[in-house]
Image (cartoon, rainbow, N blue to C red):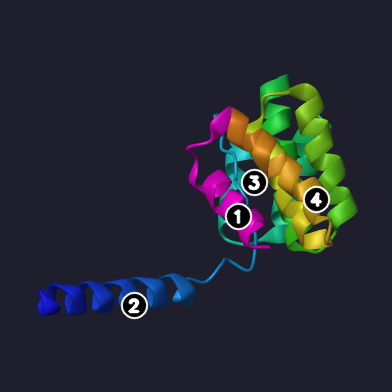
Amino acid sequence: MFRSILLASVLAAGAASGAQAQACDAEPQFAAHRTANGLVRAQYNAVTRSQWPQAIHFGEEVAGSGAASGQRAAALTNLCYAFAATAEYDQAVEACNAAIELRPDAWRAINNRGAAQWLAGDHAAATADFNAAATLAGNEDEVQANLSLARCG
């Protein structure tokens, strides 16, 4: 009996110290968007390689083109990511807003707007966006990571 109690105490202490050791992410997660459009694919590739000037160039080109609204929304979502990565938070939020205007259910744009707002220091607005993105795509890794970040922060 004494061994059982001792073992339970040791296991409980180990679980508690493991919970305390769990660290929160310091940065929000962005979600890049890839489509069949060649320029959006090139932009997506630039984003995944952290080639921000190229990602911005391709995004602005598609956003200002006569491409379908879904293609423009994807490009604007990636543009939001690129602007946020270069600490141009106001431009990032504007790009995401434009994407959301085209596609109100664009969870990546909502998530990215939240991430840009988080980096800009507006954690309340970011958390609202993370929750809105979760309503649309709650199982996506980026959304889950950002919800966790908001709970920690």
Question: Up-down: is 81 above or below 71?
Answer: below
Tell me residue 150's x, y (percent): 66, 55
Residue at mark 4? 124
Q: Residue at x 27, y 76 (%)?
A: 9
Tell me residue 6's x, y (percent): 19, 79
Q: Amino acid at mark 3?
A: Gln
Q: Quadrant of residue 78?
A: top right
Question: Up-down: is 71 above or below 114?
Answer: above
Magenta stretch holds residue 138: yes
Camera-near label (2 vs 3) is 2
What element does badge 4 sit on?
Answer: helix
The stretch of residues the image draws in magenta is 136-153
Distance of label 2 from label 1 (alpha carbons): 32 Å
Cβ–Cβ under 8 Å for marks 2 and 1: no
Distance of label 2 from label 4 (alpha carbons): 34 Å
Indicate left or right for 152 with 124 as reference.
Answer: left
What element does badge 2 sit on?
Answer: helix
Tell me residue 79's x, y (percent): 74, 46
